[in-house]
Image: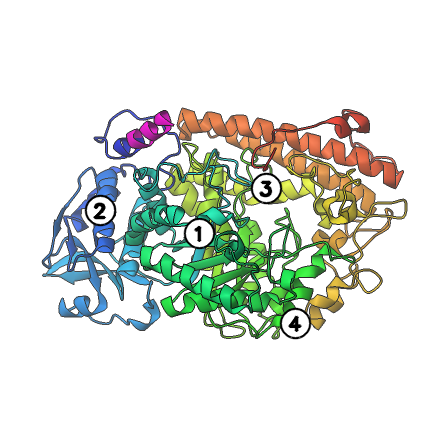
């Protein structure tokens, strides 16, 4: 523990080391490296950044100014002075009224909202200056980070005019971190929250965490696992959360806690947690008051209820709306909110697990209090390599919804597989629900543009741990970065985000950026191909979800078994979700449901999600379904091999440390892609009873070999 704390302190010192000091690249600095610019852009930036002018001061302005100083020290070699009076040849941080007093006109405050900013090149005191303008200090902080990013990427600054404002209000990380520092589905070491040492000692890493999140616009963090324990709401742990809130506050990040629904029984010694019981309501009100005394800007509660054994309102024959509203009324006087998860699968799903959230929540549309937002996973099962968008996004027009994505790669190769999630985010968010005519995309639903909402938001299950590189590998950092960009603007381009991240994390050299972005953009499709092609889902080994296990079918609950999702038999493969099966297609808007009800008009990428199809069914390629499946498995493996070849050509552009890590991980990914391909084909060939297509290699081992593999200590699995 001492060594870890010392490493964190040395890391912070290293960030402030004199320029030119020898320092290995270990990933700690993320995309905030601020390397020295080439001579011409360095001179151009220095000429416009001779000073930093902050026309007023606050804790948030102070961290914005410190960041600009840090960035300029790295990019130009000199940290400019900070002034309080107008001066040209400076970076000026000003609210809209302050800018007007400087004579900078034509700045419309309305589009900026509470958190937006505008960066313009204007004359100040008769000399050119770079002016960051916002309505609030948070916007000035976000604008400061953006200006540094643009400068680092070589954007011309002499005519710059950039306006940006978030399209979603809540842009949150959900940490599945436990109080013993284990992280459920975490693959980057232990939790970064050292609860034992808080509040007396706060690791400097917490500040760097806040910096990183502020740089991509994240403004909220849930500190503890959705599988919450009662201790999180005790005075001892509230004091620890308050310390983190104090550190995060200048960075415009609010703290939230996952609440255990049965806490009134476990902490308050009540006999019930019934949401309609007056004593229960009084207990939650008192607990909310206690929290806000310790954390005045406490964000509110995240709730997982009646799912995977967690207690909830249905234990008392109450609805999820009644459970959510109980907590919402406790925090409402303080301006708090309740985020209520729609992941509610339980024993009572005889037809189809994919139906349950919609069936439970659709009848409750319009029954939630105004300060409740329902958090919906991107797909109806569980963060699979590919799922169709969740039907609730088109089914609850009277209820604010926020999307929940998984940044940590529980089903996508853990930390070692290079799988950039930008294309997954983009695919889901651009999907058209058709709920209110064409153009009713998931992104527009979240933004409140399809049905106006008071609350809007997005949540990402964090991939952060105490590993030196934060996320278990350099390329996993891209998913944290991309999530922040999509939470700020759900309509952003995954490729543009990858280009930004690559330039800042490695180098803006186009000879490096082009190949790496191409590799990243194809990586998610490669993983789908070698894991779950053509709409298959949940074919991972059970529990730890590491590696293939399509043969598992002996567990107590049907929906814990991969065989439940594939329904592979002699007649074919796939889950029938049409009227002849579970009729889950009926949960989508009628125009879309009609398309999905027919295998010929269902996108082939989702074919086996919605249809049980014969092995000899003819695909668009002209191949049979069986041959097409094998072709996809082979293509996934080949794509990883191609990534290896691409990376090998890029050695001259990458520091040895990060190059070697990515090289080793790509070798592991290729080995595991082959394993996935061979094990899956070995199993499904027993069902299809068809030969492999010409040229396809047989599996390297027998099916018995693959079935016998065991991994009792896989990371990120409670009790594993």
Q: Is residue 567 above or below residue 2?
A: below
Measured as percent of width and height from the top left, residue 14 is found at: 27, 31
Q: CA distance from mark 2 to mark 3?
A: 36 Å
The answer to whether the residues at label 2 and label 4 have Cβ atoms under 8 Å apart is no
Residue underneath mark 3: 410
Q: CA distance from mark 4 to mark 3?
A: 31 Å
Q: Which mark is residue 673?
A: none
Measured as percent of width and height from the top left, residue 135 is found at: 27, 66
Residue underneath mark 1: 233
Q: Is residue 663 above or below residue 459?
A: above
Give the quarter of the figure containing the N terminus.
top left
Q: Residue at x 75, y 68 (%)?
A: 594
Q: CA distance from mark 1 to mark 2?
A: 34 Å
Local SS, label 4:
helix
Which residue range is magenta in the image? 1-10
Residue underneath mark 2: 66
Q: CA distance from mark 2 to mark 4?
A: 50 Å
Q: Is residue 435 above or below residue 315?
A: below
Residue 93 counted in the magenta span: no
Measured as percent of width and height from the top left, residue 163 is found at: 33, 63
* Residue 689, image quadrant: top right
Q: Residues within 10 Å of mark 3 (few under 14, many from 20)?
A: many
Report the side of 609 relative to 179 (left or right): right
Q: Nearer the viewer, mark 4 or mark 3?
A: 4
Residue underneath mark 4: 363
Mark found first going from the N terminus, 4 or 1: 1
Give the quarter of the figure containing the C terminus.
top right
Q: Residues within 10 Å of mark 4 (few under 14, many from 20)?
A: few
Q: Nearer the viewer, mark 1 or mark 3?
A: 1
* Residue 91, image quadrant: bottom left
């Amino acid at each position: 523990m001492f060594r870890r704390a010392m490493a964190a302190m040395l890391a912070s010192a290293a960030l402030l080391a004199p320029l030119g000091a020898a320092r290995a690249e270990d990933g700690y600095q993320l995309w905030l490296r601020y390397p020295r610019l080439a001579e011409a852009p360095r001179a151009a930036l220095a000429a416009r950044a001779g000073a930093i002018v902050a026309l007023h001061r606050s804790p948030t302005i102070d961290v914005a100014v410190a960041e600009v100083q840090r960035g300029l020290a790295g990019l130009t070699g000199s940290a400019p002075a900070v002034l309080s009076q107008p001066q040209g040849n400076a970076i000026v941080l000003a609210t809209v009224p302050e800018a007007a007093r400087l004579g900078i006109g034509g700045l419309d405050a309305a589009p900026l909202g509470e958190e937006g900013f505008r960066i313009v090149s204007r004359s100040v005191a008769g000399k050119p200056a770079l002016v960051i303008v916002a309505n609030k200090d948070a916007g000035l902080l976000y604008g400061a980070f953006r200006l540094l990013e643009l400068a680092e990427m070589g954007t011309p600054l002499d005519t710059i005019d950039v306006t940006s404002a978030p399209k979603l209000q809540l842009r949150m990380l959900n940490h599945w971190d436990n109080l013993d520092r284990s992280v459920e589905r975490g693959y980057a070491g232990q939790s970064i929250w050292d609860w034992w040492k808080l509040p007396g000692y706060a690791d400097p890493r917490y500040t760097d965490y806040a910096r990183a999140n502020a740089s991509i616009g994240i403004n909220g963090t849930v500190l503890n696992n959705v599988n919450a324990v009662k201790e999180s709401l005790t005075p001892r742990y509230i004091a620890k959360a308050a310390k983190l809130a104090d550190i995060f506050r200048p960075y415009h990040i609010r703290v939230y806690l996952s609440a255990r629904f049965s806490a009134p029984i476990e902490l308050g010694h009540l006999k019930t947690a019934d949401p309609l019981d007056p004593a229960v309501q009084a207990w939650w009100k008192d607990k909310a008051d206690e929290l806000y005394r310790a954390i005045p800007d406490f964000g509110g509660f995240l709730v997982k209820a009646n799912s995977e054994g967690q207690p909830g309102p249905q234990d008392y024959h109450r609805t999820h709306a009644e459970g959510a509203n109980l907590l919402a009324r406790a925090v409402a006087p303080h301006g708090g909110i309740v985020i209520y998860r729609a992941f509610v699968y339980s024993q009572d799903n005889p037809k189809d697990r994919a139906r349950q959230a919609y069936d439970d929540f659709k009848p409750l549309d319009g029954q939630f209090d105004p300060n409740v937002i329902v958090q919906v996973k991107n797909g109806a099962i569980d963060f699979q390599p590919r799922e169709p968008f969740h039907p609730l996004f088109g089914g609850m027009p009277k209820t604010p919804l926020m999307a929940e994505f998984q940044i940590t790669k529980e089903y996508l190769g853990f930390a070692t597989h290079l799988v950039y999630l930008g294309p997954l985010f983009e695919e889901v968010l651009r999907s058209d629900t058709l709920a209110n005519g064409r153009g009713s995309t998931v992104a527009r639903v979240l933004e409140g543009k399809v049905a106006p909402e008071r609350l809007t938001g997005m949540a990402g299950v964090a991939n952060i741990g105490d590993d030196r590189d934060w996320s278990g590998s350099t390329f996993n950092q891209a998913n944290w970065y991309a999530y922040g960009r999509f939470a700020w603007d759900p309509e952003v381009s995954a490729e543009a985000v990858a280009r930004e991240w690559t330039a800042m994390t490695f180098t803006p050299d186009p000879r490096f950026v082009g190949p790496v972005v191409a590799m990243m953009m194809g990586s998610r499709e490669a993983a789908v191909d070698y894991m779950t092609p053509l709409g298959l889902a949940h074919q991972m080994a059970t529990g730890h979800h590491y590696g293939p296990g399509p043969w598992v079918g002996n567990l107590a609950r049907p929906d814990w078994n991969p065989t439940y999702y594939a329904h592979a038999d002699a007649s074919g493969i796939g889950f029938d979700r049409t009227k002849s099966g579970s009729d889950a297609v009926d949960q989508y808007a009628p125009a879309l449901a009609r398309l999905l009800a027919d295998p010929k008009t269902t996108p082939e990428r989702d074919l086996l999600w919605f249809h049980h199809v014969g092995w000899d069914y003819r695909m668009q390629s002209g191949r049979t379904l069986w041959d097409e499946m094998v072709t996809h498995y082979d293509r996934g493996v080949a794509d990883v091999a191609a990534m290896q070849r691409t990376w090998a050509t890029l050695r001259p552009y990458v520091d040895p440390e990060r190059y070697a890590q990515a090289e080793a991980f790509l070798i592991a990914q290729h080995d595991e892609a082959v394993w996935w391909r061979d094990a899956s084909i070995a199993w499904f060939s027993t069902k299809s009873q068809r030969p492999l297509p010409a040229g396809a290699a047989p599996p390297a081992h027998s099916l018995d070999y693959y079935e016998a593999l065991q991994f009792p200590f896989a990371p990120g699995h409670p009790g594993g």
